[in-house]
């Protein structure tokens, strides 16, 4: 199987290439520091099957790994994509999967797990997701399956929306014609329903799920 690596950390990139070369089933189709460099190289290659698996970081400078995944999937619809990254941001995890990533590993995974993820994807079409990420993806998908109209009440949505606009509790109380204490209750309830620990998390989750 032919694996293309895109990783801007030179030590990690060379380490991955060395690791993969130890497996007789795997050959390195290319190793690049950026999405742009990889895309330029592939643009001059007429072979449609030049790669089977893309191993990519999503935290790349310039063209992001997520943008590259979309572009690679457009050019090579059958390519398998394995993400290996430090990024655990919920929105980016979902964006990478929606863009076409089949496996999502963190750099803390064992080297053999990277090899196993590649071989599993190539031979069986199986997905490998780091356990910590898998739990969060399942939680997010469960949330996506709920009725967005009932997750937050209209007042809770209004309060969160105004918080997102930078309004103070006092301003929100005046705009919604309710007491400041009631505003606080709505906000607290929103945090609980969204499983958010703070204002930033609550706004990010609410926006991600389309609640506000």
Image (spheres, rainbow, N blue to C red):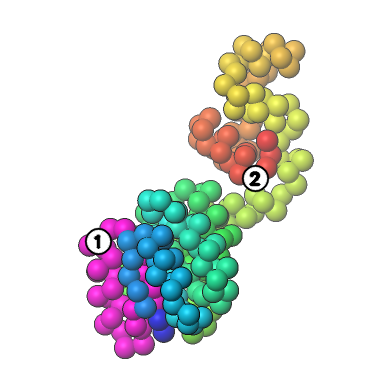
Residue 7 part of the magenta-drawn span: yes
Residue extending farthest left: 11
Q: Which mark is in front, 1 or 2?
A: 1
Left or right: residue 191 versus residue 82 is right
Q: Is residue 27 visible?
A: yes
Left or right: residue 123 versus residue 166 is left
Write the residue at 28% across / 58% down.
Answer: 9
Q: Alpha-carbon neighbours of circle 2 within 10 Å: few (<14), some, or many (≥20)?
A: some
Q: Position of residue 127 (x, y in %)?
A: 51, 72
Residue 57 or 119: which is nearer the viewer?
Answer: 57
Left or right: residue 155 versus residue 16 is right
Write the residue at 54% across / 79% down.
Answer: 125
Write the residue at 70% across / 53% down.
Answer: 145
Spatial CA distance of label 1 from label 2 is 36 Å
Residue extending farthest front: 44
Label 1's element? helix
Magenta span covers which residues? 3-28
Q: Is residue 200 above or below residue 53?
A: above
The quadrant in which residue 38 appears is bottom left
Q: Is residue 75 above or below residue 156?
A: below
Q: Is residue 60 above or below residue 200?
A: below
Tag 2 or tag 1, which sits nearer the N-term? 1
The quadrant in which residue 176 appears is top right
Residue 87 or 110: which is nearer the viewer?
Answer: 87
Write the residue at 61% across / 44% down.
Answer: 208
Left or right: residue 7 versus residue 122 is left
Say which quadrant the N terminus sits in: bottom left
Q: Position of residue 132 (x, y in %)?
A: 44, 57
Q: Is residue 183 above or below residue 161?
A: above
Q: Position of residue 170 (x, y in %)?
A: 62, 11
Query: Which label belongs to residue 209?
Result: 2
Query: Which label belongs to residue 10?
Result: 1
């Amino acid at each position: 199987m032919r694996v293309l690596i895109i990783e801007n950390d030179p030590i990690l990139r060379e380490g991955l290439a060395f690791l993969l070369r130890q497996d007789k089933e795997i050959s390195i189709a290319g190793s690049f520091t950026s999405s742009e460099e990889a895309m330029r190289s592939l643009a001059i290659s007429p072979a449609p099957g030049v790669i089977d698996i893309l191993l990519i970081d999503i935290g790349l400078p310039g063209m992001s790994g997520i943008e590259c995944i979309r572009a690679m999937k457009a050019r090579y619809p059958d390519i398998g994509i394995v993400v290996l990254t430090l990024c655990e941001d919920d929105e980016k995890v979902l964006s990478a999967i929606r863009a076409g990533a089949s496996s999502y590993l963190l750099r803390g995974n064992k080297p053999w797990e990277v090899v196993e993820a590649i071989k599993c994807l190539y031979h069986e079409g199986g997905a490998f997701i780091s356990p910590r990420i898998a739990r969060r993806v399942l939680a997010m998908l469960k949330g996506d399956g709920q009725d967005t109209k009932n997750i937050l009440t209209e007042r809770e949505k209004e309060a969160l929306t105004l918080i997102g606009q930078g309004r103070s509790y006092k301003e929100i109380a005046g705009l919604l014609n309710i007491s400041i204490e009631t505003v606080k209750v709505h906000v607290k309830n929103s945090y609980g329903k969204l499983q958010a620990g703070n204002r930033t998390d609550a706004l990010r989750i609410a926006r991600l799920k389309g609640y506000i």
